[in-house]
Image: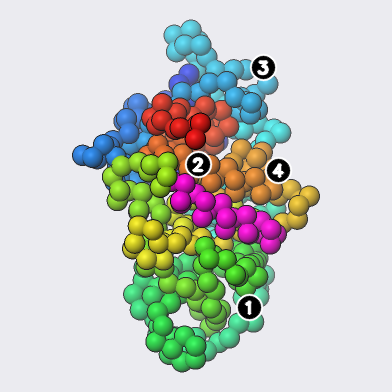
Amino acid sequence: MGHCCSKVVTDDGVVTPAGGVVTTAAAAGDGQRPKPPTSPAPFQHSSTNGIDESHSSKNTPAYSFTASPWQSPYPAGIGPSPSPAATTRRTFKWPFPPPSPAKPIMSALLKRQAPASTRPRGGPIPEENGGGCGETQLDKSFGNAKNFASKYELGKGVGRGHFGHTCLAKGKKGELKNQPVAVKIISKAKMTTAISIEDVRREVKILKALSGHDNLIKFYDACEDAQNVYIVMELCEGGELLDRILSRGVRYTEEDAKGVILQILNVVAFCHLQGVVHRDLKPENFLFTKGDEDAPLKVIDFGLSDFIKADQRLNDIVGSAYYVAPEVLHRSYNVEADMWSIGVTTYILLCGSRPFWARTESGIFRSVLRADPKHQDFDINIHG
């Protein structure tokens, strides 16, 4: 996902670069000619009429745009064309004119990962005041214990994210002796900006501050050496909620979805009461402790989380595009950002598809702001 400075908005809501073709990172990278846009394939159910086991977004249906209370992303006085034959296409420089200058989430991630001088030409446009470190020497000392190798034995890797990877490990001594744990390893070489360093400091601080809830991942230890920061946490062996959704092959019943969502609501409410907003809630960030169907859920990955006061408004755009709230795109939000993400997750459990879909990140944002999700795919008993 990236940002294109010149895009064409067509009547069906699809955003294409000037020239009328949809480009992808893969096509751009290997020199292939971009393919013309096609209508998204209907949501493909498995043989049990359930959920497609592919992670590809092309199998998720696109929904038509209807009237919405959210501010239109079109410039003042200009709306979508009534039909392709009635008028020519219009090209806009930015998909989100003021007062909501939303920029791609990947731009925010790149701002945390690398200085502008190291970004490839044609990459996402950095946000204001997000410059790189230049030649300034950054302090990458976190004050954590430096004896990780003597305390833990690392095993195989089990996951990878934007800023690090997770490995299995086993304690060598102390209370965690012979106990399996999960270790999130964050490379200091990737901490090329002051923002990325502060993100890691804040994540450890939040994990230390949050404790005492059954659906919260347990934090054990934080260590570091010259190359990495190590965050030692509870090992959850039941896999992600997303994998559980896909493996079912069918949509969740109301009763089963209720059991999942109640756990999510309870732990998120606990975080909010402690003054923490997660900002990246999605099925991938909830793990089951065991493989049992009724195993407890644990919320993980506080890398984008932040401390917040009741009357405070945050303005940075972070999170995952399909789950981002309109308030985040408008750069003024509090804990409602998490509540929106929970609503999207609930929709996925009951419908088996995403409520907002597009081929590009800016298209997803537009869908979040303007689309009216359809509910014909499921039947909810609203009376009891």
Which residue extends farthest right?
311
In this picture, which residue range is highlighted in magenta? 257-276
Residue 343 in the image: above or below residue 42: below
State if disc 3 and disc 2 touch (CB < 8 Å).
no
Q: Residues within 10 Å of mark 2 (few under 14, many from 20)?
A: many
Q: Residues within 10 Å of mark 1 (few under 14, many from 20)?
A: some
Which residue extends farthest front?
384
Q: Find the distance from the CA under tag 2 to the CA under tag 1.
A: 36 Å
Q: Earlier in the sequence, mark 2 or mark 1?
A: 1
Q: Find the distance from the CA under tag 3 to the CA under tag 4.
A: 24 Å
Q: Earlier in the sequence, mark 4 or mark 1?
A: 1
Q: Find the distance from the CA under tag 2 to the CA under tag 3.
A: 31 Å
Residue 38: give x, y in percent of width and height: 34, 27
Query: Residue at the location (54% across, 24% down)?
Result: 91
Residue 165 in the image: above or below residue 131: below
Q: What residue is shown with label 3?
A: 77
Q: Hey, what amino acid is under mark 2?
A: Val
Which residue extends farthest left?
47
Secondary structure under badge 3?
Answer: loop
Q: Earlier in the sequence, mark 2 or mark 4?
A: 4
Q: Hey, what amino acid is under mark 1?
A: Phe
Residue 344: mark in rendering: 2
Q: Hey, what amino acid is under mark 4?
A: Ser
Residue 142: mark in rendering: 1
Q: Hey, what amino acid is under mark 3?
A: Gly
Left or right of 6, for residue 39: left
Q: What residue is shown with label 4?
A: 332
Residue 12: give x, y in percent of width and height: 45, 21
